[in-house]
Amino acid sequence: MTGYWPIGKTSASAITIAVDKINNDPTLLLGYNMTFLWNDSMCLAAEGLNQAVEFRISGVDAIIGDGCDIICEPAAILAASWNLPMISWGCESSKLSEKSIYQTFARTVGSFSKMGDLFMSVLGYFRWKSIGIIASTESIWQLAMSGLMKVFLENDIEIRYLHTLNPGHVLVTEREEYKSMLALAKETARSKRYN
């Protein structure tokens, strides 16, 4: 809910909706009633580990979250030692794919190491040969951008526009200083199709 990536403020209500739908659907979880607890990890490793321990003490059957790699990596080791499933909706660290360490960890997003193949499929489908990249200055997005740039260059995709920005906590499309940057990106990165 708080911290450098307060995504919970805009997405936490989804859990309430999902739990209500599951509990009200007579074809799901017959004889069971799903409940949940939530805590604010603040995207800080120490606080995230404290919250994982609190969940364990509370007797939860699974941990859903966190969205921050700095928490998922150590908390997933704890969850494995407790034989407790942990499912992340946002952690994409490639380390988390090592099943000998993170035995009970699963995620609903892929790791950034697989993003290149996804983008190349999209580019190939539309026969695009040039692109523009706008990436956050946050380290995880810079890492993703570097990996993607390598894949694009290896596949002869021309990077016609490259810009990094500090997104803060306001949508970029609502910030005046970025409207001209988005317009320039749109004009500069217009894709050329294969012949």
Image: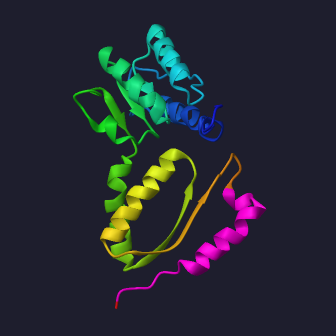
Find out whether residue 93 is within the magenta segment: no
Give 184 or 56, whichever is nearer the viewer: 184
Q: Among all residues in the image, which is located at the extreme right?
A: 176
> Would you say 45 lies left or right of 181 here?
left
Image-quadrant location for residue 118: bottom left
> Would you say 179 lies left or right of 72 here?
right
| Secondary structure, magenta segment, majority class | helix
Quadrant occupied by the C terminus: bottom left
Write the residue at 38% across / 75% down. Answer: 157
* 106, above or below 160, in the image: above
Q: Colour scheme in the image?
A: rainbow
Which x, y percent locates residue 92? Answer: 41, 42
Write the residue at 74% across / 59% down. Answer: 174
Residue 37 is at least partly visible in this image: no
Which x, y percent locates residue 48? Answer: 51, 23
Which x, y percent locates residue 34? Answer: 47, 23
> Would you say 135 lies left or right of 114 here?
right
Write the residue at 59% across / 35% down. Answer: 12
Q: Among all residues in the image, which is located at the extreme top?
A: 57
> Would you say 173 lies left or right of 154 here?
right
Which x, y percent locates residue 6? Answer: 63, 37
Residue 80 is at least partly visible in this image: yes
* 97, above or below 186, in the image: above
Span of residues in magenta: 172-194
Give 166 or 127, whichever is nearer the viewer: 166
* 145, above or below 26, in the image: below
Q: Among all residues in the image, which is located at the extreme left?
A: 100
Q: How many numbered tags mark residues here?
A: 0
Find out whether residue 175 is within the magenta segment: yes
* 34, above or below 192, in the image: above
Write the residue at 52% across / 36% down. Answer: 18
Quadrant occupied by the N terminus: top right
